[in-house]
Image (cartoon, rainbow, N blue to C red):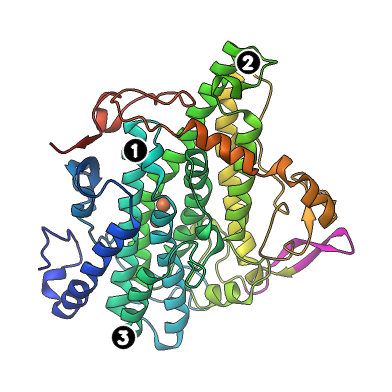
Amino acid sequence: MISAEKIPNNVNLSSNKRLQRALEHWQPKYIQWWRDMGPQGFQDYHQVYVRTAISVDPEGWAHFEYVKLPEYRWGIFLADPTPDRRIGFGDFFGQPVWQEVPGEFRNQLRRLIVTQGDTEPASVEQQRWLGQRCPSLYDLRNLFQVNVEEGRHLWAMVYLLHSYFGRDGRDEAEELLERQSGNRDKPRILEAFNEPIDNWLDFFMFTMFTDRDGKSQLMSLSESSLDPLSRTTRFMLTEEAHHMFVGETGIARILERTCELMKEAGFSEDVRKVGGIDIPTIQKHLNQWFSLSLDLHGSEVSSNAASYFANGLKGRAKEDTFDEHVVRNAYYNMEFFEDGKPVTKEILMRNAMNEVLRDWYVGDCAAGVVRWNKVLERHGISDRLRLPDRKFNRHIGMYSGFHFDPNGVPLSKDEFDRRKFEWLPSPADSEYLLSIMAQPIYEPGKFANYIAPPRRGINQLPINFEYVRTEQ
Ligand SMILES: [Fe+2]
Ligand SMILES: [Fe+2]
């Protein structure tokens, strides 16, 4: 039975019998999916100290408790409505926002919601083995916190599908549990969500760069004229911020430890000899996840993006900071690649909306890299991490047929293939990373050799708190 106790919500679930029945039908399938495809080996005998959202106000949001993962209370929360909210961009600028889905945009909206929804369970699937190689109980708990919240994001999208899209929505909600990350026959919709994440360097880079694509997408959806979509994505953004915190501080702590080990081993020595992760390996993983996440923003020139904008379905990140919101006659200077050379052309801004969002994303990533480099600077180490050129390693959009090095210098396919492991993780790199992560650390307060402890614990608890405990 569904109750506010079981499914915390602020959508008055108990008064909507039809929706309740739909969710009651879907919930057992979700739990089965979570058991099969969620964190492996941590379903039945472990309790995790997690944060559960029980309301959108600050107190409800800061509710911490020990739970068994399958018993996490996945809730449905929408940010509070903005009184008299108006459409903020596109052809319907200034009109009241929609509380129901307009028939003419039903397919487009469903597509947007399903595509967002598909990424949420996908990342849980990708990360399901990481618990067996965790660097500490603190990190293990953070992984599970991210996982349960991605599960909640799936609930958020399924709530919209069930509430506003009738039978189609119900079918889509089922399919969200049927596709599987990396599955040959039924893969997840977007490529980055089919890549395996089997070591913690990948995990931290994923939460830094791919969850930040989530932030891009959620920011643009939170501008949507469909008010329930706007409100649900606004609340999801508060959780997304924590995922990026996990990624950014995870890499910062690896860098911290790498610097210490470099000093201990002597700067001319290979830091791998003392069990650390060398800076070039960190850079390669950065290159990998940054370029995959650039792809997630879609083609540079896109009539779909133009139509989403015109129809008021998906805006720009921070739409209210732009001067003009209808954007009918504005142009964007875009770099094309023709006959081996970059050529700048003017294209209609509406057709460039994916690129506009990507610009915002690259800026947000760059700020994170500056913060990482402060760690290296503080230790007096001259190496620096950097974002590769946005043409590097692209599989979607106008650069996808070409090859570039991380500086954006064009290369032949042969040359790229010959040199790609200078810039992207090689099988030997992955093997090395797995070798130093082979023994999970489950002792409170202890950390794997390749990563420094965090500055502080969760919810003001000490770092050596037992964040995940085994049931007696
Ligand atoms: Fe998410
Ligand atoms: Fe996320």
Could you give the CA–CA distance between mark 1 and mark 2, rounded to whole angstroms?
31 Å
Q: Position of residue 244 (x, y in %)?
A: 45, 43
Between 195 and 99, which is closer to the camera in this rendering?
195
* Secondary structure mainly formed by the magenta segment: strand
In the image, residue 455 above or below residue 178: above
What residue is shown with label 2? 380
Residue plotted at (17% across, 61% down): 7
User: Type of residue at label 2?
Assistant: Gly
Q: Is residue 79 visible?
A: no
Q: Which quadrant of the figure contains the C terminus?
A: top left
User: Type of residue at label 1?
Assistant: Leu
Which residues are drawn in magenta? 328-346
Q: Is the residue indicated by label 2 positioned so its CB lies within 8 Å of ligand 2? A: no
In the image, residue 365 above or below residue 400: above
Task: Tell me which numbered mark, 3 or 1, is placed earlier along the sequence.
Answer: 1
Please say whether residue 342 is one of the residues in the magenta stretch: yes
Q: Is residue 217 left or right of residue 64?
A: right
Task: Tell me which numbered mark, 3 or 2, is placed earlier along the sequence.
Answer: 3
State the SS at label 2: loop
Count neighbours of disc 2 (C-alpha within 10 A) and say few if under 14, some if 14 to 19, many if 20 or more: few
Q: Is residue 102 visible?
A: yes
Q: Position of residue 458 (x, y in %)?
A: 29, 32
Indicate which label's residue lies in the foreground, 3 or 1: 1
What residue is shown with label 1? 140
In the image, residue 373 above or below residue 269: below
Count neighbours of disc 3 (C-alpha within 10 A) and say few if under 14, some if 14 to 19, many if 20 or more: few
Q: Is residue 240 left or right of residue 248?
A: left
Q: Position of residue 253 (x, y in %)?
A: 48, 28
Answer with the quarter of the image where residue 424 lies. Answer: top right
The image's mark for residue 167 is 3
